[in-house]
Amino acid sequence: MAKWTPADMPSLHDRTVIVTGANSGIGQAAAAAFATAGARVILACRNVDKGNAAAATMADTVEVRALDLANLTSVREFAKSVDEPVDVLVNNAGVMAIPYRRTADGFEMQIGTNHLGHFALTGLLLDRIRDRVVTVASTAHWMGRIDLTDLNWERRRYQRWPAYGQAKLANLLFTYELARRLAAAGSPLKAHAAHPGYASTNLQSHTESLLDAIMSLGNRLVAQSAKMGALPTLYAATMDLPNGSYAGPGGITTQHGYPKLVGSSRSARDEEKAANLWTLSEKLTDVTFTF
């Protein structure tokens, strides 16, 4: 089987792509590849200075706009700034296994940033999206459990890795539910997910614990590059795939290699849980999708 690379992407001239968290890691690598293929790319970044530094390394079809997914006011302001059609929205930004913190709106930081911020952003932009939504998930979703009675860890004792697993499972539940609702509405839009495998990025350096040093060593010894980690995102964003597809590295462990369609956990395919998470997400974010 041929190894899929960015050279296999179609021309993206006259197309607009938004990538959240595009100032580093797989987001930056994906944004650069989109721009190289001719797309106009909006780098949606919490830190605009870092976004500008990343943009300076890319083709001149990119621009930087402020977006803090941990603040719904920022999400709404960003959405209002997008007054043009968008072909692809890439929900890429995220945090992993960080100490207990809350967003500006009182959400636990991992579910708030990784899921609720992107949920709100997608809903607010949906009337301008012309092709697809790609949400970056993780193999950590396999350990995830969604607690709809305590999504924000207000009653449970906070545990950083279960919280990360819950957030990444939420990404997939959202993607599959969005795909179902788009199809039911007769919309031509698609929703896909992708995961990078084990890629060397800054994501692993914010646990504020000994894990930072351990994962830094892993990044040097066994991780694939951010450019390789971005391939499933690029694949999901540009290839003609069935609605609700999930892409990831094609190696034996699904942590390394070139992209292909991959499987997800039974929990990720729980349609009742997905529908209930959707309803709760609309309530928490005060964003209702119109199809």
Image (tube, rainbow, N blue to C red):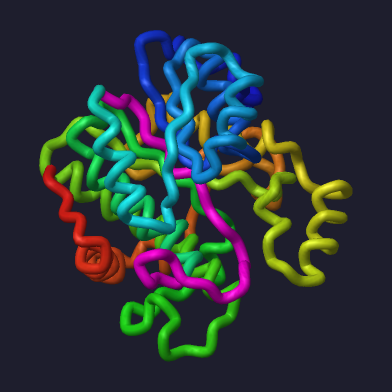
- In this view, 90 is above or below 120: above
**Residue 213 magenta:** no
Of the 4 image quadrants, the one containing the C terminus is top left
Seen from the viewer's position, the closer of residues 47 and 269 is 47
Residue at position x 47%, y 89% in the image: 156
The magenta segment is 85-108
Residue at position x 51%, y 30% in the image: 235
> Magenta segment, principal secondary structure?
loop
Horizontal side of residue 261 vs 210, given as left or right: left
Report which quarter residue 13 is drawn in: top left
Residue at position x 41%, y 40% in the image: 134
Seen from the viewer's position, the closer of residues 21 and 289 is 21
What is the x, y in percent for residue 60? 53, 12
What is the x, y in percent for residue 3? 65, 25
Q: Is residue 202 visible?
A: yes
Horizontal side of residue 207 vs 111, given as left or right: right
Report which quarter residue 14 is drawn in: top left
What is the x, y in percent for residue 108? 45, 72
Horizontal side of residue 78 vs 20, given as left or right: left
Q: Is residue 266 visible?
A: no
What is the x, y in percent for residue 215? 79, 59
Of the 4 image quadrants, the one containing the N terminus is top right
